[in-house]
Amino acid sequence: MEINPFAIRTLRQEKGWTQQHLADACAISLRTVQRVEKEGSASNDTLLGLCAVFEVEQKQLLVLPKPTHEQMQQVSLYQQRILLTVTTLFGGCIGALIMYLVIK
């Protein structure tokens, strides 16, 4: 899993802990703590241990993936279709209302 290394380092330093102290508290190796703080990669068990020790939710430590260009285009096309459909229905209703008022 991809973890925010800055968040881990900051939380550890706020508590005044060394990397070894954090490793002991989480029951993981010092090398794992070093890797998490440097690369931001960790197993799910390591993430859960860090969350428990720091008393935070997973979402505070995880790095959210950025959408790809293709995913952004798909969302835009979907939104464009919805907007076109709503506009067409709204325009049709207004047109029908105008025709009703003119014929009446």
Image (cartoon, rainbow, N blue to C red):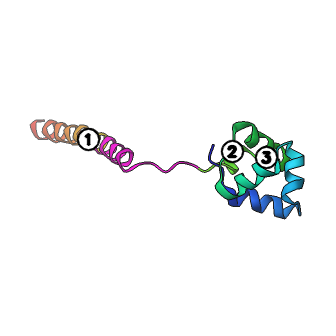
State the residue position of label 3: 50
Q: Main secondary structure of the magenta part?
A: helix
Does the CB distance between marks 2 and 1 fall below 8 Å?
no
Q: Residue at x 15, y 36 (%)?
A: 100
State the residue position of label 2: 42
Q: Earlier in the sequence, mark 3 or mark 2?
A: 2
Magenta part of the chain: 64-80
Give amino acid for label 1: Phe
Q: Is residue 103 left or right of residue 80?
A: left
- Mark 1 or 3, closer to the camera: 3
Q: Earlier in the sequence, mark 1 or mark 3?
A: 3
The disc at residue 90 is 1
Q: Earlier in the sequence, mark 2 or mark 1?
A: 2
The residue closer to the viewer here, 42 or 100, is 42
- Mark 3 or 2, closer to the camera: 2
Tell me residue 77's x, y (percent).
30, 44
C-alpha distance separating marks 3 and 2: 10 Å
